[in-house]
Image: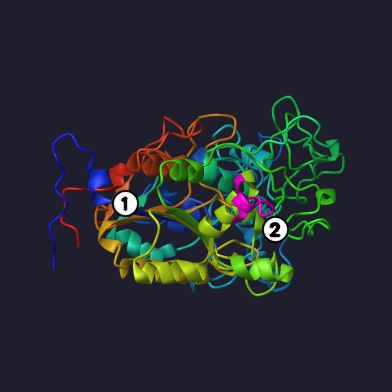
Amino acid sequence: MLAAGCASAPGSDPLKSSIDTVVVIYAENRSFDNLYGLYPGADGVANASAQSRTQLDRDGVTPLATLPPVWNARGSQRDALDFVARLPNGPFRIDAPPGGLPGGMAMNVASPDLVHRFYNHQMQLNGGRNNQFAAWSDAGGLSMGYYDGSTMQMWQLARQYTLADHFFMGAFGGSFLNHFWLACACTPVVGAGAPAVAVSRIDGHGRLVTAPDSPASALQGPPKYVGDRSLTPDGYAVNTAQPAFQPSMVKPSPANPALADPAGSPLPAQTLPTIGDRLSDKGVSWAWYSGGWKAALADRNEIYGGNVKFQAHHQPFNYFARFDPSTPAGAAQRAEHLKDYDELLADAQSGRLPKVVFYKPHGGLNQHPGYTDVQSGDEHVASLVRRLMASPQWSHMAIVVTYDENGGFWDHVTPPLADRFGPGSRVPAIVISPYARRGFVDSTPYDTTSILKLITRRFDLEPLPGARASMGDLTNAFDFNQAAR
């Protein structure tokens, strides 16, 4: 049964009269081509140019004769993926069907992880030509793999609503930095005095300096570097660093167990403005819900292990001084805004979700290669979407399901130029709402900061300085004139 859509007064913003709740679900480490490269009507693998498809060796000139082996595969993973080294140079199906490629790895099996770090990623992009992914990966040819995603539950939801096929990860590299770009459109700063042991060694072209014993060819072994570390030479933290507050991989401080031991060199507490600050300043309710949050606080064995594989570097707000648990104000902010997945389910069912919701699945359900598979995370996210659609708040809700970064997987589309930090490769993004366009592929240029721009526009916030003017605000994914279901 159709209900009447929200009518907007002349000159008013229909986003504000139609959407009351924005939910952002942030999965892990998949490029657009890796999961949606075969999606009908999207800019997929078939559109890749010969330049992008043909991977060059480390000299930047010689095309690889075949794809390199999956160097970091071990045990059963190595056996399942040994066919990769016999493949011609180009993209290939990881989940080869019967009668297709020999071997293959189904979507319910975790593949090896692939390097996905700040400088490595830029070297793989090779100035936007996207033709050195296999050369600069510790997983070799696996970087060129993609799945037939048509069996995914989220694929089916994309068919019902809107799939954005030109949505780019906010920053080059990995999860740590891209979670910051979701929280603040910013890169964390260490500044002067950073220990030299934490600074990356790069050449005059911004590329990592290779070690003397690094194999000259990607067909001979994975690359080795003199110093692929956490910081840029000018003090920005671009690869994983641990928070100064628990939960952190750095052991608790002897002075206060709620803090990280300073001797473990955690990242200094950050003070740049976040989207949470902007929302709180305007009196708009918000929360970051995370799978395993309570478990990780109660048991350090759950951090990167245990049953939930909680990822401390996936919790961006826990890096900010506003959430310092050693102060009464910080403890109060944590209680109000940093919550567990169980609380998300309860709030959705009761209709008490805050105006802005961020949700981070724990490591066992986030689709990250190396420690989980595609299928379990797909089922988990789709199940949550269905629960949100059953919520009393659904009639005026917008859900954005996307990924933090590409996880080292190739994508054929050149990222747009913005600034020294990104954007990086394309990632999937699906917009689900009673007001989302139906069965639509949205090719508007977006990146992670587009989510912040949508929230900023809806709630009349002061814009964050790092939100990119060249990227859309996701409103092209909506049709506010259609009837709300």
Residue 106: give x, y in percent of width and height: 54, 71
Q: Is 395 rendered above or below residue 221?
A: below
- Residue 372, located in which quarter of the rendered image? bottom right
Q: How many marks?
A: 2
At horizontal 35% and vertical 53% (from top left) the residue drawn is 163
Front-most of residues 103 and 277 = 277
Q: Amino acid at mark 2?
A: Gln
Q: Is residue 464 left or right of residue 194?
A: left
Residue span colored magenta:
322-331
Secondary structure of residue under mark 2: loop
Q: With 303 as the anchor, is 349 left or right in this view?
A: left
* Left or right relative to 200: residue 376: left
Q: Is residue 407 left or right of residue 398?
A: right
Q: Nearer the viewer, residue 217 or 34?
A: 34
* Residue for point 49% across, 37% down: 414
Q: Nearer the viewer, residue 456 or 92?
A: 456
Please name whichever residue, 160 or 21, is drawn nearer the observer in this view of the structure: 21
* Residue 46 counted in the magenta span: no
Quadrant into which the C terminus falls:
bottom left
Residues at marks 2 and 1, CA–CA distance in whole angstroms: 45 Å
Residue wearing tag 2: 246
Residue 428 position in % (x across, y down):
44, 52
Q: The disc labelled 1 sits on which kind of residue? A: Gly
Which class describes the residues within 10 Å of circle 2: few (<14), some (14-19), or many (20+)?
A: many
Colour scheme of this structure image?
rainbow
Q: Quadrant of the N terminus?
A: bottom left
- Which one is earlier in the sequence, the residue at label 2 or at label 1? 1
Q: Which residue is mark 1?
A: 41
Q: Is residue 169 visible?
A: no
